[in-house]
Amino acid sequence: MEDKMSFFDICGGRLALQRRYYSPSCREFCVSSPRLSLRLLTVVTCTVWLAAYGLFTLCENSMILSAAIFVTLLGLLGYLHFVKIDQETLLIIDSLGIQMTSSYASGKESTTFIEMGKVKDVIINEAIYMKVIYYLCILLKDPGEPDGISQVVPVFQMEIMKFRQIKNCLLSSCFAQFTGWAVGLVRDSFQEGPMRPEPRPF
Amino acid sequence: MAYRGGGGHGHPHSAALNVSPRSLPTCRTHTHSICMVSDFFYPNMGGVESHIYQLSQCLIERGHKVIIVTHAYGNRKGIRYLTNGLKVYYLPLKVMYNQSTATTLFHSLPLLRYIFVRERVTIIHSHSSFSAMAHDALFHAKTMGLQTVFTDHSLFGFADVSSVLTNKLLTVSLCDTNHIICVSYTSKENTVLRAALNPEIVSVIPNAVDPTDFTPDPFRRHDSIITIVVVSRLVYRKGTDLLSGIIPELCQKYPDLNFIIGGEGPKRIILEEVRERYQLHDRVRLLGALEHKDVRNVLVQGHIFLNTSLTEAFCMAIVEAASCGLQVVSTRVGGIPEVLPENLIILCEPSVKSLCEGLEKAISQLKSGTLPAPENVHNIVKTFYTWRNVAERTEKVYDRVAGEAVLPMDRRLDRLISHCGPVTGCIFALLAVFNFLFLMFLRWMTPDSFIDVAMDATGPKGAWTYPHPYGRKQGDNNEVSQVR
């Protein structure tokens, strides 16, 4: 069974979500963003080169032009290899664990696997990251103390989705077994106890 | 498996966009979505902080949606939820001086605009004139066309350079604000004069104390001796120098008189000198810094409360003391005369002689037994200042403000130029234009419709009130069932 949908992320870009249900206990979710757009590439290259030509006319040193070429090429390579993620896949096998794969535009792939036994909960958290965003993350159990959290692992690092999409398309279907969560309101584990307005040293 | 594609997805979102209080008159007629902005909030401690917290809690109780925006305090950054789903944004802005952020009037616009839009805020309520962030938020809110309310918590002078400058800034900041709240009539007078305001848009809503925290306990005090309690920061403004003159004079006159002094500050050294010089170690106890929860335990040990402040907008300490059943002796400065009725307070001039006379009067009343019983005093005082009452009155201000129109850009510029003097007015009118252009640019970069609507933690549809918010909210389940 397979379904596909597409929606806008919070920056107005288009995302495609593909869900495959292999068996009741095994499913795969795949979010892909559009490939590197020619327009963005042209705009960035043109700006860098125009700036370089501007400098060149001022100081008449041809080194600037070659430097501009290198900067554009290296920048593009670096962007494709380390920043631009084309596709992120989340494979969930209920009894085994969660595997997250991100494939970069250059073809590089990085895979993380989290054992189901280590997963404490899956929540939607809120963070200030240039703007205020919601993101899905997995809380890992702390082996030392039973109630503690050792690590927070974000799922789908590149694609910043809207709350409704995270909740309806991902959380409700892929992590259906974790129902005790609430966004940001994970009272017992994640939040510091409610503050009382008492202490006021003179 | 048919699922609504990208085109269809615009619909639920644009529907969500229109959920403003006015479009749902049946269920949200009188509820507002309020954003409190101040540089001062917990974990910082003080009067403004507790005011914001208590007011927000009472407004949530009355069914409004409240969020708080402040700057990051060390490790406390990001988004936190407090009791009853009160959401606090700790923004990563640089702190410049005395816990107040630096202001450029522009750098905070992207984040604040994002928060105002995603939370669907309708009223911006800024606190404290010392807070740069509060003024920034007012400035941006007016550019965005939101209603604005400002609460002033302090009194200022008019004479020295720093107050002249702050007063000018306040004039600019408040000249197009919808409504201003002051904590006492003296404070109102002061603010109206400083900011050259129309007094009709200034309301007086006093602070409150939690009367259940300040109950009398007559068995804790020794009736064989008379104890005078002083609880204040030991700084010049609080009149610690007067206190150091009073202590030796009264201690020589009354051998059965003791002092308990709570609080810390740079002037503590003077009190220690006095204690040393007159050998009063067993009669003058200096407790040092007190936590707010310990204040009551100190207050109930005394018979008389002494306040020697030289300036005060609204004195919380004397209300707390009166609530604990103490006879209050205070200086007649600022807003103090309006705080308590005359039979509960003895007012004196801010001089050693006058304060000593006032204290002697209180002592003679105490010895003759004409003072009212602490329990009676508490019962009278506890009806005076409650947070629920403050919230109710603040709500009236919000109702009034919500009906008013926000000044459009051209009239706002007119107001700035005509109201704030030719030079300052023109500068700030120019800045307001820049701010507007910046906002246009931001709206072009990320249109309002792309901004995610935040989940409502408080308010009538708040998630906090449900034990399991997930799965119960607003029929979102329909979409899930479609997919499966």
Image: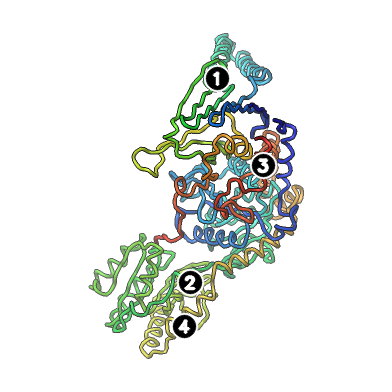
At x 24%, y 69%, the residue is: B276
At x 27%, y 82%, the residue is: B255
Residue under disc 1 on the same chain as residue under disc 4: no
| Mark 1, residue position | A104
| Mark 3, residue position | B435
Q: Label 2 sits on what residue type?
A: Pro
Q: Is residue B114 left or right of residue B305?
A: right
Label 3, residues with CA under 10 Å away: few <14, some 14-19, many ≥20: some
Q: From the image, which quarter does the N terminus of chain B lie in?
A: top right
What distance separates the C-alpha of mark 3 from that of mark 4? 56 Å
Q: From the image, which quarter does the C terminus of chain B lie in?
A: top right
How far from the left and from the top, in percent, is residue B155?
53, 63
Q: Can you tell which mark lies on residue B376?
A: 4
At x 50%, y 32%, the residue is: A94
| Mark 2, residue position | B211
Q: Give the number of the mark in front: 3 or 4.
A: 4
- Mark 1 near mark 4, Cβ–Cβ under 8 Å? no
Label 2, residues with CA under 10 Å away: few <14, some 14-19, many ≥20: many
Residue with the most extreme bottom position:
B368
How far from the left and from the top, in percent, is residue B81?
52, 50
Q: Give the number of the mark in front: 1 or 3.
A: 1
Q: Label 4 sits on what residue type?
A: Asn
- Mark 1 near mark 3, Cβ–Cβ under 8 Å? no
Q: Label 3 sits on what residue type?
A: Asn
Secondary structure beneath dot 4 equals: helix
